[in-house]
Amino acid sequence: MIARAQDANSLTDLADGGAAHIASTISKIKQKAPSILVEALTPDFANKGVEAVHQVASSGLDVFAHNVETVERCTPFVRDRRANFEQSLKVLEEAKKGAKAAGKEILTKTSLMLGVGEQGHELEEALRREYTRTMVHLAYLTLQACERPTSTSSLSASTCDPPSDT
């Protein structure tokens, strides 16, 4: 059985970005049912310090998930303005470090959306960086097809298309 901790977007305004709440939830799940595999989809804990990442990573979870979302060039067009590609890789890297320091082993997971204007070579570079980044060694990568934007969506199919040479 796999349990997923709640999405942490509603916790990001807390002083620790919700790290204590997430870690506590995971610990309680593991205390009640140690055989349950727990995956937590985490925020980047921006400006909260690596301690917040380490707290969640060492809480007993099995899979630490943090979504990179898209290739680096498209990040400003599809993610919150406070997020960036490098920051997301650092979160995954710190999760591995935090778990290892606590004597625990975790798997890391991230996701990339496809179809927001990325180029093939950018996708290859993103995959290379995500997989080979020191300490990250992703266990899971999900690729998601971006649905065609609706008329009410702020994201268009050409949101981050590179400029043409004409």
Image (spheres, rainbow, N blue to C red):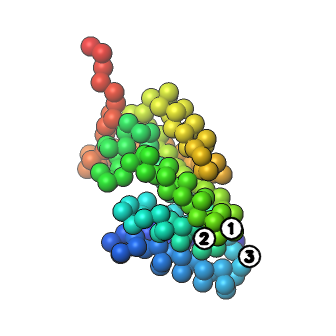
Q: Are marks 3 and 2 in contact (CB under 8 Å)?
A: no
Question: Relative to 24, does residue 92 appear above or below in the rendering?
Answer: above
User: Which numbered disc, 3 or 2, marks the residue that appears first in the sequence?
Assistant: 3
Q: Secondary structure at mark 1?
A: loop
Q: Which residue is mark 3?
A: 35
Q: Are marks 1 and 3 in contact (CB under 8 Å)?
A: no
Graded by Cα atoms within 10 Å as few (under 14), some (14 to 19) or many (20 or more), the crowding at tag 3 reads few
Q: Quadrant of the C terminus?
A: top left
Q: Give the alpha-carbon distance from disc 1 to disc 3, as whole Å.
A: 16 Å
Question: Relative to 89, does residue 64 appear above or below in the rendering?
Answer: below
Farthest residue, direction top? 166
Task: Tell me, for residue 104, which label it has, or none.
Answer: 1
Q: Which residue is mark 2?
A: 58
User: Which numbered disc, 1 or 3, marks the residue that appears first in the sequence?
Assistant: 3
Q: Amino acid at mark 1?
A: Lys
Q: Residue 62, how many percent across, how many down?
A: 65, 66
Q: Residue 39, how many percent across, how many down?
A: 60, 66
Question: Relative to 45, does residue 33 appear above or below in the rendering?
Answer: below
Residue drawn at x 54%, y 58% is 94
Q: Residue 72, how many percent across, how many down?
A: 41, 39
